[in-house]
Image: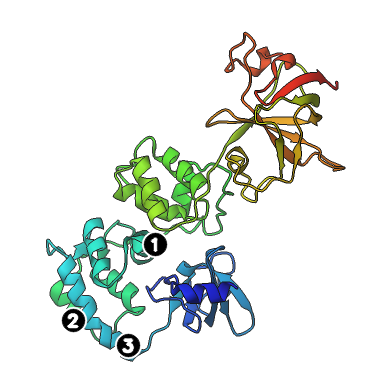
């Protein structure tokens, strides 16, 4: 039972205002783009489902499964006033150079002061940084931490950190209905600008788009805004970005990008024989995330087996870009259409270069370490 397991663990996510989203908590829906009519509605948290990364919230007329970042814990004015002095004290202690804003390092220390770990840094930065300048000023921090504009304390803000005068910037809302591409589609820099709704950072490197797409493939449910935040704070070093996002507890998949394997003639369908050194070939259904990595690493439960020496028909072959493993699409046990897969292994070289263009590769060369090509059905 998901509810019982969450309750036993005692761990629940935190919403956009930092409050814990435990069952029974009153919340307001914020920041939804697909169903904007539910923004501002209030409801009650019913259940936290870590498998999907969503909180079940009972609204007045329906039950919704929402991401924690789209839920703001409702606080009373009494709670706001009681927390105000603590928030100010923590902010002052974290603002080491006294310039009235928190940079990345100061912000991490600030979160530690209110009992939050590093795993919340990226998500809370995204929620708080309303002017997208990669710094958190006192007004932004207070609005986030208390879930209010903190009426009656503006004079205190002006006393400690007088706000610099800024010229208003026009807002272009032409991309309000922009749809983020699916997880298996690579983004362009233009896509990122539309998602962020602002220009790329001034120090954006030439390899920045590659980092975004690699991180997005590895963490498909992590927001693009968070990836860019992590890149900025980790000096655009891809390995550090992946480690940083991983430390946040984001769901990670192990992608295995593939491309079709072709030849100069009609290569498939063709008959193959199982020659696997390990004996049986396992038959798999493609995982929900569309990645072949689970097959390659044998992390998926097999649908069945093909005994060593048995023949089978391959209708299509995809080759992984990372290690070169090949995957064959087959029919299994009376399927009308070939919709299951086997790991064929690596392409065996028969006096030819594996990297040769498809137009120069002959179908007879398409034999693999675990499957021997017998003949073409064409």
Which of 340/268 is in front? 340
Relative placement, left or right, of 8 versus 202 is right
- Which residue in the protein does label 2 denote? 155
Estimate the x, y position of residue 190 in percent, counting from the top left: 47, 44
As drawn, 326 above or below 2: above
Tell which residue pokes out farthest to the bottom in this image: 78
> Mark 2: which secondary structure?
helix
**Disc 2 and disc 3 in contact, CB within 8 angstroms:** no
Residue at the spot 76% in from the left edge and 16% down from the top edge = 265
As drawn, 173 above or below 255: below
Relative placement, left or right, of 259 versus 103 is right
Tell which residue pokes out farthest to the left in this image: 97
Which of 103/20 is in front? 20
Estimate the x, y position of residue 46 in percent, counting from the top left: 55, 80
As drawn, 248 above or below 46: above
Estimate the x, y position of residue 191 in percent, counting from the top left: 49, 46
Q: Residues within 10 Å of mark 1 (few under 14, many from 20)?
A: many
Tell me which label, 2 or 3, sits earlier in the chain.
3
Q: Residues within 10 Å of mark 3 (few under 14, many from 20)?
A: few
Measure how far apart labels 2 and 3 are at the Cα level.
Answer: 20 Å
Measure how far apart labels 2 and 1 are at the Cα level.
Answer: 29 Å
Residue at the spot 45% in from the left edge and 45% down from the top edge = 215
| Numbered mark located on residue 79 in the image | 3
Tell me which label, 1 or 3, sits earlier in the chain.
3
**Disc 1 and disc 3 in contact, CB within 8 angstroms:** no
On the question of residue 199 being in view, the answer is: no
Residue at the spot 63% in from the left edge and 22% down from the top edge = 347
Estimate the x, y position of residue 260 in percent, counting from the top left: 66, 29
- Which residue in the protein does label 1 denote? 123
């Amino acid at each position: 039972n998901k509810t019982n397991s969450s309750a036993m663990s005692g761990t629940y996510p935190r919403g956009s205002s930092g409050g814990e989203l435990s069952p029974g908590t009153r919340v307001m829906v914020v920041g939804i783009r697909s169903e904007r009519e539910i923004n501002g509605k209030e409801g009650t948290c019913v259940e936290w489902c870590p498998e999907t990364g969503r909180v079940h919230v009972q609204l007045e007329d329906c039950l919704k499964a929402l991401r924690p970042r789209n839920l703001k814990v409702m606080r009373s004015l009494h709670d706001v006033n009681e927390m105000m002095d603590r928030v100010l004290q923590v902010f002052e202690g974290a603002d080491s150079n006294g310039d009235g804003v928190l940079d990345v390092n100061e912000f991490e220390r600030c979160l530690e002061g209110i009992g939050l770990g590093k795993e919340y840094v990226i998500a809370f930065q995204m929620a708080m940084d309303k002017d997208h300048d990669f710094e958190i000023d006192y007004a932004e921090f207070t609005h986030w931490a208390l879930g209010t504009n903190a009426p009656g304390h503006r004079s205190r803000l002006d006393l400690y950190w007088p706000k610099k005068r800024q010229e208003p910037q026009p807002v272009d809302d032409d991309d309000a209905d922009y749809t983020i591409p699916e997880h298996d589609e690579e983004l362009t820099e233009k896509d990122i600008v539309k998602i962020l709704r602002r220009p790329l950072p001034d120090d954006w490197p030439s390899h920045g788009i590659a980092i975004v797409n690699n991180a997005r493939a590895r963490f498909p449910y992590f927001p693009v805004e968070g990836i860019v935040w992590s890149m900025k704070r980790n000096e655009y070093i891809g390995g550090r970005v992946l480690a940083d996002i991983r430390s946040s507890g984001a769901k990670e998949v192990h992608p295995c990008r593939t491309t079709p394997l072709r030849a100069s003639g009609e290569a498939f369908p063709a008959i193959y024989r199982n020659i696997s050194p390990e004996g049986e070939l396992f038959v798999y259904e493609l995982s929900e995330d569309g990645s072949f990595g689970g097959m390659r690493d044998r992390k998926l439960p097999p649908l069945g087996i093909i005994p060593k020496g048995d023949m089978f028909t391959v209708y299509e072959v995809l080759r992984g870009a990372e290690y070169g493993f090949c995957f064959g699409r087959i029919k299994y046990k009376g399927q009308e259409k070939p919709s299951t897969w086997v790991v064929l292994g690596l392409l065996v070289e028969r006096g030819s270069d594996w990297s040769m263009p498809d137009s120069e590769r002959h179908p007879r060369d398409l034999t693999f370490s675990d499957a021997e090509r017998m003949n073409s059905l064409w």
